[in-house]
Image (cartoon, rainbow, N blue to C red):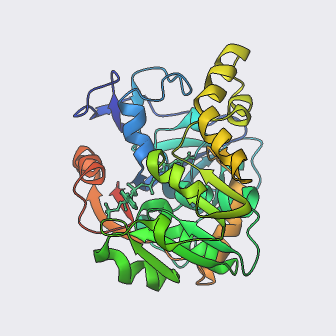
Amino acid sequence: MKAFMIERYGDRNGGRITETPDPRAGAEDVLVRVHAASVNPLDFKIRDGDLKAILPYRLPLALGNDLAGVVVEVGAGVTCFAVGDEVYARPDKDRIGTFAELVAVHRNDLAPKPATLTMEEAASLPLVALTSWQALVERAQVQPGQKVLIHAGSGGVGTIAIQLARHLGAHVATTAGAANAGLVEELGADVVVDYRTQDFEEVLDGYDVVLDTLGGETLEKSLRVLKPGGKVISIAGPPDANFARELGANPVLRQAMNALSWKTRRHAKRRGVTYSFLFMKADGDRLRELTRLVDAGEIRPVVDRVFSFDQTREAMEYAGKGRAKAGKVVVAMR
Ligand SMILES: NC(=O)c1ccc[n+]([C@@H]2O[C@H](COP(=O)([O-])OP(=O)(O)OC[C@H]3O[C@@H](n4cnc5c(N)ncnc54)[C@H](OP(=O)(O)O)[C@@H]3O)[C@@H](O)[C@H]2O)c1
């Protein structure tokens, strides 16, 4: 089969479509013919070698963390999927490589594709929708009437997180450029702060939850818009001890990772709020719940642009800088 692969880390123009052996489906696996895959910042971070310490892949490596496609084979232990099913997934972090014609995915990481979506739309969802779910439903336990701030509302995560927070009954604020104000309002934002001309810290106050997708100064300021007892959940800030534990890091690495968030946690404690880092996980069961929300019209994908498979490198370049619009960039294999 063909796959978009990197041979070494750190080459920003790296990656090319290469012939590679077809993946084999183990007993608990489902072999999927990929129809579409979406681009995530995670793909650049892996390509650039930024995550080598926590995600030690063997090279050459096929990139790609999201897929929609059709089942072509099931392992002996798989009863919940059959050949011909339309599915979508964010495969486990140790089994990525969806910029490819075929991928073997563990059955627990797959879900039926939303019937109301095209393959390209479905492929845009798994990683960002699971991230939003794990942050807002599982970690923050957002309740109706709570005030939730979603940073970067026009991004892949932001466009879905706004809709999910709204579905949970929250009052939603978001930061976005002026050009995307209309879009994020349509998705359910009650308050839009133009991050280029306004300081969100000066206009927002008393929030229960912040989903931080940017880290750095945005994260520090986010601690100050929370009410006492509020929570910042960051997917882009420094890691914490819980994340290190989940990763199975050794005690030295665990301590080193926890030290990276020490200052932020200290600032949070002083203000009577909490900071935690989230690294999303593959989860077919939660993806099934998201499928239901999508088919019920509660959440819709936002696709910026679709590229063909042989334009995968261009798709990554486009997603990485100078995008025209909002939402996700997708690569269509078929
Ligand atoms: N830890 C995890 O499990 C996890 C999961 C998913 C994503 N992430 C990380 O979360 C981050 C966001 O992911 P994504 O998929 O949403 O990325 P994305 O689709 O590339 O979106 C980034 C967005 O940030 C906006 N933006 C840039 N600077 C901003 C600012 N100062 N204030 C508000 N918005 C700003 C951009 O808007 P403009 O177009 O207006 O510039 C763009 O829409 C990435 O770093 C990614 O790696 C982590």
Percent across and percent down for residue 77 are: 77, 42
Q: Residue furthest top?
A: 252
Which quadrant would residue 241 be assigned to in this image?
top right
Q: Closer to the camera, 322 or 211?
A: 211
- For the C terminus, the image quarter is bottom left
26 sits left or right of 93 in the view: right
Which one is nearer the viewer's eye here, 181 or 228? 228
Q: Is residue 127 left or right of residue 193?
A: right
Give the tally of numbered discs. 0
Which residue sits at x=71%, y=75%? Answer: 146
Residue drawn at (47%, 53%) of the image: 218
Residue 197 horizontal side relative to residue 221, left or right: left
Residue 176 x, y percent position in the rendering = 38, 69
Q: Locate residue 330, reporting x and y percent.
A: 36, 58
Residue 170, horizontal then vertical, whole percent: 67, 78
Answer with the quadrant where ligand 1 appears in the image: bottom left
Establish if 224 lies above or below 13.
Answer: below
Q: Quadrant of the N terminus?
A: top left
Residue drawn at (42%, 73%), measured in percent from left and top? 193
Q: For the point 65% across and 79% down, which residue is it? A: 167
The one nearer the camera, 257 or 167, is 257
In this rendering, does residue 287 appear at all?
Answer: no
Q: Is residue 116 visible?
A: yes
